[in-house]
Image (cartoon, rainbow, N blue to C red):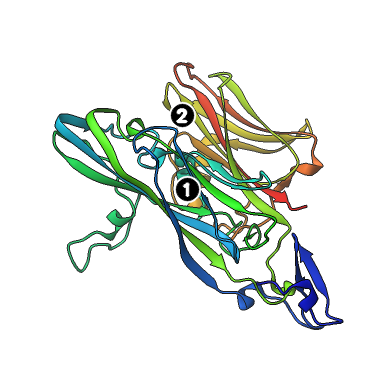
Amino acid sequence: MPIPEMAIPAGQGRVQIGSLFFPTAPQGYIGDFNRATRQSLIPVTTLTPPNPGTAGQQSRQNLPSSGFLGGLWLQVSGTTATGVGGSTVVNSPQYPEPPFSFIRRLRMVSNQNVEIINLSGYSLYEYSRTLRTMFDPATPFGKRVTPGPFDPSVRYYNPPVSLGASSSQTWIASYPIWSAWGWSLQSGVLLLQDPAITYQLEITWGDTTDLYASTSGATLSNVQATVMAELYSVPQFADDFPSMSFTKTVTEEIQPLTTGTGDNTFRFVTSNQLPRLMHEVVNNGVPINPANATTLKIQYASTQVPYVINSDLQLFRQRMLYGQDLHCGWWIQELSNSFGLPELVSNRDIINTAQLTDLFSIITLSGVTLTGTQFLRTVKEQLVANR
């Protein structure tokens, strides 16, 4: 806990962070957050929808009020049951990926109206795949079943399946919700014990249409989200604090495609630092064939075009940057992976848009006939200056 203002010894310095005062260390002290803190993992809550199976319901929970927050761990599960003559049908492959898509919206927001996270469950899943090399919650790998007959991966991921009459299945999806920028806690950790700032997790639930292509006589029960917080203790001295200059935010926007042959432009609202832009291109309700994308560009100050990337080579670069291919239709303007490891973020190439009048991300398509549900989905990761 921070030392109250009156308890700081006379002559010792202090630093105000938020509404709290923290003492500074004696002269000559070298700060080190990792030396002065330690990790803890604690349960936060289990959220349940008021009426399982009714889309659009929301559940909310305040986050803990002590320590620094590195992130949350979230597991969503539910049971689908069919009655006599009932059934469920899944497509192979399904889009968006179930059961991750069962969360229609997840928000982590402060009482200052700062959205730390605002993503659909599917976008949260795809974003999580860019945080660690070769990490995919839906693709376990390695020797998992020896010794013994059980596969541990089904305890954190179990996709919905087609069911016949009088059957049931429990489906499971798990997410890391990492609010810090990078696993080394370089920036973006949230000080939870400032009484002036509180944080809340909000989940908007889906229904059977987010899990199955079609259902008959199917019901959902035992729907819940189990939440665990990864916290770090507050050091005694302010010198040991991590960087408190920025808060990382990850939000999502959707806009219509403007053309099937030519440029589709996303206009970025300038003012923050930009480490990553993720784009998904969808036409007729499914991601486009990658062969129909030709070029990716970033343009700013009207004439500066530092990135002009062949889309096929970008898919190859993504394989190298993240150790895996992302799902069809996704391209990423990655600006924080200069060390070649998504775990070890770097600010070498991130763009400080506060110094720009405009910034555009452009995807050029060729030979796409726009029809049905079509859009450009954009996930924005930003570093927002704390004021």
Determine the CA span between mark 2 and mark 1: 17 Å
Q: Where in the figure is residue 152, as x and y percent of width and height?
A: 28, 60
Amino acid type at mark 1: Arg
Q: Where in the figure is residue 162, as x and y percent of width and height?
A: 21, 36
- How dense is the environment of label 2, judged by Cα within 10 Å: few (below 14), some, or many (20 and up)? few
Amino acid type at mark 2: Ala
Question: Which residue: 16% across, 33% down?
Answer: 83
Q: Is residue 138 left or right of residue 162?
A: right
The answer to whether residue 343 shows anywhere in this view is no
Nearer to us in this view, 203 or 31: 203
Label 2 sits on a secondary structure element that is helix
Question: Which residue: 39% across, 39% down?
Answer: 102
Q: Label 1: which residue? A: 319
In the drawing, what numbered circle is on residue 291?
2
Q: Is residue 83 left or right of residue 24?
A: left
Label 1 sits on a secondary structure element that is helix
The answer to whether residue 64 shows anywhere in this view is yes
Q: On the image, which quarter does residue 54 sit in? A: top left
Q: Is residue 84 left or right of residue 348?
A: left
Nearer to us in this view, 189 or 381: 189
Name above or below for residue 193 compared with residue 352: below
